[in-house]
Image (tube, rainbow, N blue to C red):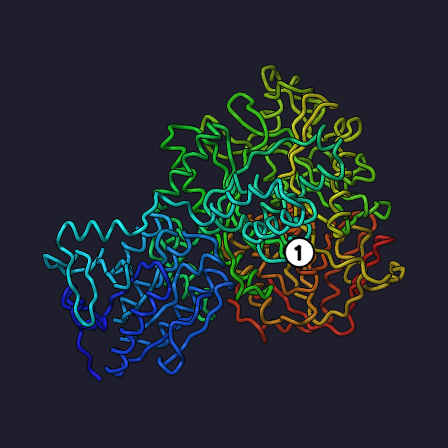
Amino acid sequence: MEFNNRISTGFKGFDEAIDSLRLGDNVVWQVDRIENYQAIVNSFVKKMQEEKRKIVYVRFGKHQALLNENEVTVTFYIDPTIGFESFATEIHRLIEKEGKETIYIFDCLTDLLSDWYSDLMIGNFFRVCCPYLFELDTIAYFALTRNVHTYNTIARIRETTQVFLDLSKVEGNFYIHPLKVWQRYSPTMFFPHQIEGEQAISITASTDASALFANLNRVEERMDYWDVIFSNAKNDLNKDEETKQKTKELLMSLLIGERSRMFELCDSYFSLADILQIASREIGTGFIGGKTVGMLLARKIIEKEDPDLFGQRMEPHDSFYLGSDIFYTYIVQNGWWKLRVNQKTKEGYFSYAKELREKLFTGDFPQTIKEKFIQVLEYFGQSPIIVRSSSLLEDNFGNAFAGKYESVFCVNQGTPEERYEAFESAIRTVYASTMNEEALEYRLNRGLFAKDEQMAILVQRVSGDHYEENFFPHVAGVGNSSNLYVWDKNVDMDAGMLRLVFGLGTRAVDRTVDDYAKLVTLDNPARKPLLHMDDLKKFSQHGIDVLSVKENILTSVSVDQAISKVWNVERNLFASIDTETAFRLKDLGYENMPTPYILDFKLLLKHSAFPKDMKRILQTLQKIYEYPVDVEFTANFKSKEDYKINIVQCRPLQTRGLGKAVEVPEIKKEDACLFASNGNFMGGNVRIAIDYIIYVDMKAYLSLKEQDKYTIAREIGVLNRMLKNKQVLLIGPGRWGTSTPSLGVPVHFTEIQNMTAICEVASEQSGFMPELSYGSHFFQDIVESGLFYSALFDGEEGVRYHPAYLEAFPDVKEEFIQMKEELKHVIQVKQTDEVELLSDVVNQRLLCR
């Protein structure tokens, strides 16, 4: 039926005073008591019933129900403990379902504080809800309790709503004081009005108005409810243990999240004072995220379990944490919530992500947040910092999210304005990375589609020092407490391993182009490298990642350039002089060249306590976690005896175990096989019956143009989807997942994650030399997905590789993919019969036949 655009409040006189409500109005009532709001609601609903309008009551408050189910068309119950995003999304879908010109009655918004503990998020909820209600020509009633919320929250709500009314009850009489009535005006509209029956009497006389307002309790500026909770918690520091424990658990639920294994570990090691110290360094409100929690917990475990090592060796930290509520506020502030809701649907999960990602690079932050960002930058001065993702699900048991979200270095040089813009840009980049396709695929494949993935941010001071125009730490890397993927039968897998680099740790977590990190087995740090790496110089680190203070960027320099600038410690701790190159340069007459070095870390690993300290740290963390761990670290030295270690990240290392022992038969020369190898595989003991072998021909691939190499990578991705749930062995030249097509096939990990096993074939002549990526983000993906990995160094002793073995099997690729004629010879998809992949970790033997 057709309705008039003007809607009654249920009070005829007040309708005249404000020129009625209009379709599209959101009406916010500021009240002292919920009973006063209920009286206003009852009169309004009675009028709407007379007009036979659809009435929806949104019930979430802890106060008594405002309406009975027989008074409304629909009562929608929703639990605010599901969190802001789920709550707001459900309300959005309700509004979408109920359609145009619906009447809504919402419970008092103040009640949300008991579950969200944040004025900021109540303001955000109203900002996302109100415009959609307006768009659909609804009328919606909301209430706020007076003198509870911050002025900023009230201001945001008043700015967004169409009608804002102050309701008081004095000596039995109701008074309504309009504070905002959008696009309506009369000479008496904004006076208080006394309600008498259907009449509304304007209080225009100064004596009457001052007498009325004198009876109303007004208070000074109020703190955000979040700050009130934490401020009050300080009073409990000197109370009994039971009270302190109860308060600590409340604060942990606000900063860390719901009860989980990580929550229990934090409960065991953090005191109430620790939690308050963490809260004092949070910017905004909300969760601090998994990466932050992992870093703080690791440090606290070492402090309590090994206080001598902590006091002597651990570098202090002074990080800040941007709460997850800032992420939501950023989206709401810039008007992208509807896009966010659409992206959270199955249909829009990928299709809306690209648009939202682009927008996340461009938004503005609220002024109050900007001021806090400025304070952070003033604190750090011109010290380099790193802005790191710290999502709620990140670095947790079962979900590492390794490398899925961005981290951004801020060299932090230039004017205050330039440094601030770089900082804001870094935050936007991290936020935008939540919509990266690889991150979305990861969440989808791990059953996290419906989970709120709230993005907090960890802001850390970069560990290191200035060496002329560059800034970097002496060493950095990744440590694993359990070296499950061993390459030598003499390696003690329980001793752990390091992936060690000189300079920034970026080269340790990424598979670098034509460069190699130092792999250190902590049972014997001086153990020689993998069998194929007998050329120490060739298979060592050649580039050093540094922060250029002069250029204000992350960049790379040569080993010789970086080492020659180190002034505060003996250089031979990390590198040995490359005497062969030095003599050759001298013979050629180059006398002013920097001394050439080879990064072998020989003195560091043989004659310092550093490897032992790292082993202690890793084993202590594994013991407490009751699970293998993966850490990222830096270390800075004054001498081989005097150094500081900084644990910048810690997470559970996802492993599947060694598996049952497998007997791999001896292979004679005349025996046919696809490949056999001693060592150079990762993935435990396996005996797998292979259904399909995808083979990328090395010579054919090498002859392709670069663009065609990317085409091959995309075809592999199609096969990955088509052959899901089959036992598939993938064999190809060089590095899978490289960003450089000349070094291997440039697939994304999501394009090979359904494979059972992957094999990288090395050819020194062709330049294809896989780097075993222990500790890198690629390694984390391999481990989490349970892929078996092997590297074949054709021609090495103990290695047999016979691709001709595949000729006996039919090529069935055309059943799955349609390729250009000129590329068909590059990929073969062999449907195999009785081919098995076998590995024996103890004896380090691998066979496929």
Residue 712 sits in quarter? bottom right
Quarter occupied by the N terminus: bottom left
Q: Nearer the viewer, residue 489 or 830?
A: 489
Residue at image location 16% in from the left, 60% down from the top: 183
**Amino acid type, mark 1:** Phe
Residue most toward the front? Answer: 171
Give how far across and how far down residue 709 sits, in percent. Answer: 54, 56
Q: Can residue 514 be seen by looking at this rendering?
A: no
> Residue 485 location, x and y as percent?
76, 51
Say above or below: 815 vs 368: below
| 13 left or right of 784 in image | left
Q: Quadrant of residue 272?
A: top right
Q: Which residue is mark 1?
A: 397
Classed neighbour count for the residue bearing mark 1: other residues with Cα under 10 Å, few (<14), some (14–19), many (≥20): some
Regarding residue 70, the answer to whether it shows in the image is yes
Which residue is at 65% across, 43% downward? 271
> Along the horizontal axis of the image, is 450 left or right of 493?
left
Seen from this angle, which residue lies furthest left?
Answer: 187
The location of residue 86, given as percent across then percent down, is: 47, 64
Q: Secondary structure at mark 1?
A: loop
Quadrant housing the C terminus: bottom right
